[in-house]
Image (spheres, helix red, strand yellow):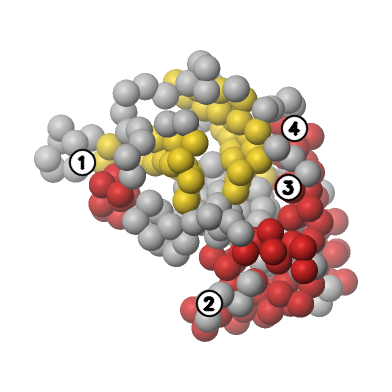
C-alpha cells in the first residue's frame, strides 16, 4: 500500500492541491492534524480531505477551532486566525473535526499530532523530548506533526549516554525503514517552518517499508491574496513566503 503522509495543512488549499497533484497515486492518506488554523480556506481543506480515503488525528488548531480549549496559549495572530476559523467552519465540518481521535494505530504505525506522550499539545523539539517519548507508544514507528519541521528521531537504547539521535530526511533517495524505532515528522503542507517555503510531505510504501520525503512549490501568492481578502494577520501572510 502507498500512503500519503501529511500534516499541518492549516487551511492552505493551494498547498494541499499541489501536494495531491505531486503525490501521484496512493491508496490512503494519513493526516496528522491541524487541517485548519492560520490559512484562508478551512472549509475547502476539510472537504478536500473528507473526499479522499483517509484517517486523521486531531491537532491543537483543530481543537481550538472547535472551542474545546482556551486560545490564551496562542500568540495574538494565531488566536485571531483561530477565532476567524471558528466562525467560518460549516456545521458539518465542525462535526467532522469534533469526531477526530487524538491518536491512531495503523499497521505498525502510531499517528499523533504532537507527541505520543501528549498527543495534541507537546512539541518534539529536541533529542531529550524525543527520547522520553519512545516509552509512550508500542509500535516500531510513530508519525508526528506539530513543529512543521521535517525530521526523524531514532531510538538508540543501547547507547546509555544519548539514547536518541536524528536522521535528516533526504529528498534524493527513499529511506528504508529497518529495525530501529523511529519518530517521524513529514513537515507541514501549509506552513513550513524550516526555512524552505515549499510544501512538505512524505510517501510511505508499506510493502517495501520505504519512506520518501518530498517538497513541492505551490502558488504561495494565491494563498497570500486570499488571506489579505479575508483580513487575516499580516505576519501570517508574510511568513509563508519565507517558510518560517
Ligand atoms: Zn500546526
Quadrant containing the C terminus in the rendered view: bottom right
32 sits to left or right of 12: left
Mark 3: few/some/many CA within 10 Å (<14, 14-19, 20+): some
Q: Nearest the camera: 38 or 102?
A: 102
Mark 1: few/some/many CA within 10 Å (<14, 14-19, 20+): some
Residue drawn at (66%, 56%) of the image: 35
3 sits to left or right of 139: right
Q: CA distance from mark 3 to mark 4?
A: 16 Å
Say the numbered circle drawn on residue 69: 2
Among the two numbered marks 3 and 2 on one chain, the one whose residue lies closer to the N terminus? 3
Q: How many marks?
A: 4
Q: Nearest the camera: 225 or 64?
A: 64
Q: Which residue is mark 1?
A: 163
SS category of the residue bearing label 1: loop
Q: Position of residue 129 (x, y in %)?
A: 30, 55
Say the numbered circle drawn on residue 22: 4
Q: CA distance from mark 4 to mark 2?
A: 35 Å
Among the two numbered marks 1 and 3 on one chain, the one whose residue lies closer to the N terminus? 3
| For discs 2 and 1, the disc positioned in front in the rendered view | 2
Q: Which residue is mark 3?
A: 49
115 sits to left or right of 41: left
Q: Position of residue 5 (x, y in %)?
A: 59, 38
SS category of the residue bearing label 3: helix
Q: CA distance from mark 2 to mark 1?
A: 34 Å
Amino acid at each position: 500500500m502507498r500512503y500519503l503522509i501529511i500534516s499541518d495543512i492549516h487551511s492552505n488549499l493551494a498547498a494541499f492541491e499541489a501536494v495531491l497533484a505531486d503525490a501521484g497515486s496512493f491508496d490512503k492518506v494519513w493526516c496528522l492534524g491541524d487541517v485548519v488554523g492560520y490559512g484562508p480556506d478551512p472549509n475547502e481543506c476539510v472537504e478536500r480531505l473528507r473526499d479522499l480515503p483517509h484517517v486523521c488525528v486531531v491537532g491543537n488548531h483543530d481543537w481550538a477551532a472547535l472551542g474545546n480549549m482556551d486560545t490564551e496559549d496562542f500568540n495574538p495572530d494565531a488566536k485571531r486566525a483561530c477565532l476567524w476559523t471558528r466562525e467560518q467552519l460549516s456545521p458539518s465540518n465542525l462535526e467532522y473535526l469534533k469526531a477526530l481521535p487524538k491518536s491512531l494505530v495503523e499497521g505498525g504505525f502510531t499517528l499523533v499530532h504532537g507527541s505520543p506522550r501528549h498527543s495534541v499539545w507537546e512539541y518534539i523539539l529536541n533529542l531529550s523530548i524525543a527520547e522520553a517519548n519512545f516509552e509512550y507508544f508500542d509500535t516500531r514507528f510513530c508519525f508526528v506533526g506539530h513543529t512543521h519541521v521535517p525530521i526523524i528521531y531514532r531510538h538508540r537504547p543501547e547507547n546509555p549516554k544519548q539514547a536518541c539521535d536524528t536522521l535528516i530526511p533526504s529528498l534524493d533517495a527513499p529511506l528504508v525503514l529497518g529495525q530501529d524505532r523511529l519518530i517521524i515528522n513529514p513537515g507541514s503542507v501549509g506552513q513550513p517552518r524550516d526555512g524552505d517555503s515549499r510544501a512538505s510531505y512524505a510517501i510511505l510504501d508499506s510493502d517495501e517499508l520505504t519512506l520518501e520525503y518530498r517538497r513541492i512549490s505551490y502558488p504561495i501568492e494565491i494563498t497570500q491574496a486570499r488571506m489579505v481578502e479575508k483580513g487575516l494577520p499580516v505576519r501570517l501572510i508574510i511568513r509563508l513566503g519565507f517558510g518560517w
